[in-house]
Amino acid sequence: VAVTVTNLVSMTLQAQLELDQQFNWSVPQVNLDIRDSHHFNQQILNSILGIYGFGNTEMSGGFVVDVNSANGKFDQWQIRFEDFYALNKKRKLQVDGLSGAVNWLLNDASNDSYLTWQSLLFAGMPVNQSEVNFNLSKDRFELLGRHEFPVFDGAIVIRELMADNLFSESIGMSLNAAVLPMSLK
């Protein structure tokens, strides 16, 4: 079974799956291509984000979500951003010029992920143009290599960041970081 849903302004959704005689589905594949995230957010996403405390988020630009399955359930994700912008004033979060791809596999090691941005506001702290390389596999996140994030006139250096058991009640985390001198001006 294959289905395509298109909104001429903002998105195209393509879904494909196999059905047996008892209507059990398997091998689902979904591709969601958001060309105008502002319109998509106004019509659909904002109400969903509101459930999780991120309502009134503004966004523009595009992104693509691919969800696939090797074992009958959704166990492979990829989200690709291209010049994406998002702002949530209440949560003090903002990203400008976000590009890159986030990959995830449930049962195996995934391809490495990378994100770049022109500017980022994280909990009210400005992070200038930078990039991050990481791996998100199974229930584990790992920053790949040393990263230096420019903040104000200094930087935060993360030498190691690893989190595991992401889908459980108790997350394990390892962090080795330093704050380079900054004047907070």
Image (cartoon, grey):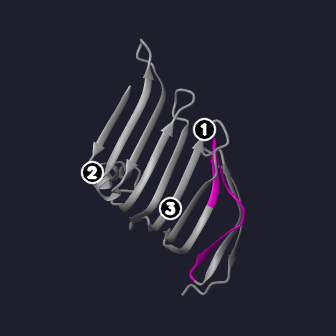
| Residue drawn at the location 53% of the way across and 32% of the way down | 69
| Residue drawn at the location 59% of the way across and 66% of the way down | 131
Q: Residue under circle 1?
A: 106
Three-letter amino acid code of the residue under disc 2: Gln
The disc placed on residue 43 is 2
**Between disc 2 and disc 1, whose residue precedes?**
2
Q: Is residue 6 above or below residue 100?
A: above
Query: In the image, which is nearer the foreground, mark 1 or mark 3?
Result: 3
Q: Is residue 181 above or below residue 175?
A: below
Quadrant (top left, top right, bottom left, bottom right) of the N terminus: top left
Residue 151 drawn in magenta: yes
Q: Residue under circle 3?
A: 99
Q: What percent of the width, then of the height, locates residue 47?
A: 32, 50
Label 2 neighbour load within 10 Å: few <14, some 14-19, many 20+ = few
Three-letter amino acid code of the residue under disc 1: Leu
| Residue drawn at the location 54% of the way across and 54% of the way down | 101
Secondary structure under tag 1 reads: loop
In the rendered view, does 98 fall on the left or right side of 174?
Answer: left
In the rendered view, does 184 fall on the left or right side of 25?
Answer: right
Q: Nearer the viewer, residue 152 or 82?
A: 82
Which region of the structure is painted magenta? 133-152
Q: Nearer the viewer, residue 63 or 181?
A: 63
Q: What percent of the width, then of the height, locates residue 117?
A: 52, 68
In the rendered view, does 94 fall on the left or right side of 48?
Answer: right
Quarter of the image for residue 181 reads bottom right
Residue 85 drawn in magenta: no
Three-letter amino acid code of the residue under disc 3: Ser
Label 3 neighbour load within 10 Å: few <14, some 14-19, many 20+ = many
Secondary structure under tag 3 reads: strand
Task: Using the numbered discs, state the Cα–Cα distance from disc 2 to disc 3 in whole angstroms.
Answer: 23 Å
